[in-house]
Image (cartoon, coloured by chain):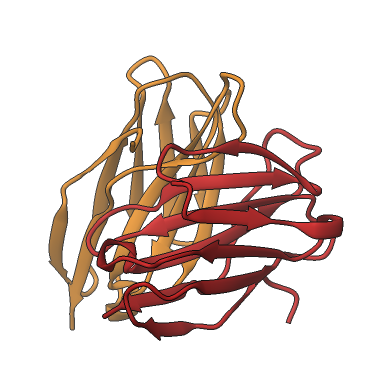
Chain colours: A orange, B red
């Protein structure tokens, strides 16, 4: 079963705009990771945020984590057509397992 | 290339046949994962290894599925008597399991189509 959900399920924006997607999860975590997946391809690791961190930046990516609300957000600034992909969050639970649990994904389409 | 490597990239098989997939993790990574992903869904956990030991298996991993990681290096995932419902992308990931907060890196996946 999947731990969480991403919101929205699909997002369509114009090139240059910002894209925000959210992830909610259910259990206590050690960290949360965001991945990108182009159609039919593997997952590309974007960023990891630890449970004691609230915000992290990497290039045009900004990730926030609110452990009290069990939620995270991924902001992509100044989007490009090449950002078109599905984005997934994955959590590493604290409770006696080393598996990563994925959300349902947000399908982002950036229009040129 | 020092990333996670999966072979084959695509496999088409007839229902009832057996298939085997291979995953080569990043060389220093001691933890290896298998996931399954169907169209429009997020990856679902199947199993993971710490070195050669298989430490956790999902209920999704029926008795037709078996995974091995001999010598703690590459891993194989075998599906016996394939069914159409096994059609999916099978993803492998590896991570350095000595640290709690470490990135998991995925391969390009093997897309299985059962006809």
Which residue is drawn at the image coordinates 26% and 55% (left, top)? B41
Q: Is residue A78 visible?
A: no
Residue B70, by quadrant, is bottom right
| Front residue of this view, candidates A20 and A104 | A104
- Which one is nearer the viewer's eye here, B114 or B102? B114
Residue in view at x 57 percent, y 69 percent = B107
The answer to whether B1 is drawn above or below residue A27 in the figure is below
- Quadrant location, the C terminus of chain B: bottom left
Q: How many marks?
A: 0
The answer to whether residue B9 is seen in the rendering is yes
Q: Is residue B59 left or right of residue A48?
A: left
Q: Where residue B96 sits: x, y (%)?
A: 76, 48
B59 relative position to B77: left or right: left
Q: Position of residue B23 (x, y in %)?
A: 65, 69
Q: Where the N terminus of chain B falls, by quadrant?
A: bottom right
Q: Is residue B90 above or below residue B14?
A: above
Q: Nearer the viewer, residue A74 or B82?
A: B82
Residue A16, percent from left and from top:
24, 71
Residue ID at (34%, 57%): A87
At 56% across and 19% down in the image, what residue appears?
A: A95
Q: Is residue B32 above or below residue B111?
A: above
């Amino acid at each position: 079963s999947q731990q969480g959900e991403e919101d929205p399920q699909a997002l369509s924006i114009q090139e240059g705009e910002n894209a925000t997607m959210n992830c909610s999860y259910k259990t206590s975590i050690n960290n949360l990771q965001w991945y990108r997946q182009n159609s039919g391809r593997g997952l590309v690791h974007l960023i990891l945020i630890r449970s004691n961190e609230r915000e992290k930046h990497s290039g045009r990516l900004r990730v926030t984590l609110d452990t009290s609300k069990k939620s995270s957000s991924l902001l992509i600034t100044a989007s490009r057509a090449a950002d078109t992909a599905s984005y997934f969050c994955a959590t590493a639970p604290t409770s006696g397992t080393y598996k990563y649990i994925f959300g349902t994904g947000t399908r982002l389409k950036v229009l040129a | 290339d020092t990333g996670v490597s999966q072979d084959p990239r695509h496999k088409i098989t007839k229902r009832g046949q057996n298939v085997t997939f291979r995953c080569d993790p990043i060389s220093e990574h001691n933890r290896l994962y298998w996931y399954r992903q169907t169209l429009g869904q997020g990856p679902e956990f199947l199993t993971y290894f710490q070195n050669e030991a298989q430490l956790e298996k999902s209920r999704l991993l029926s008795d037709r599925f078996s995974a091995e990681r001999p010598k703690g290096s590459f891993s194989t995932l075998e599906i016996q008597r394939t069914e159409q419902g096994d059609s999916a992308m099978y993803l492998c990931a590896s991570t350095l399991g000595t640290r709690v907060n470490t990135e998991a890196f995925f391969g390009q996946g093997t897309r299985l189509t059962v006809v």
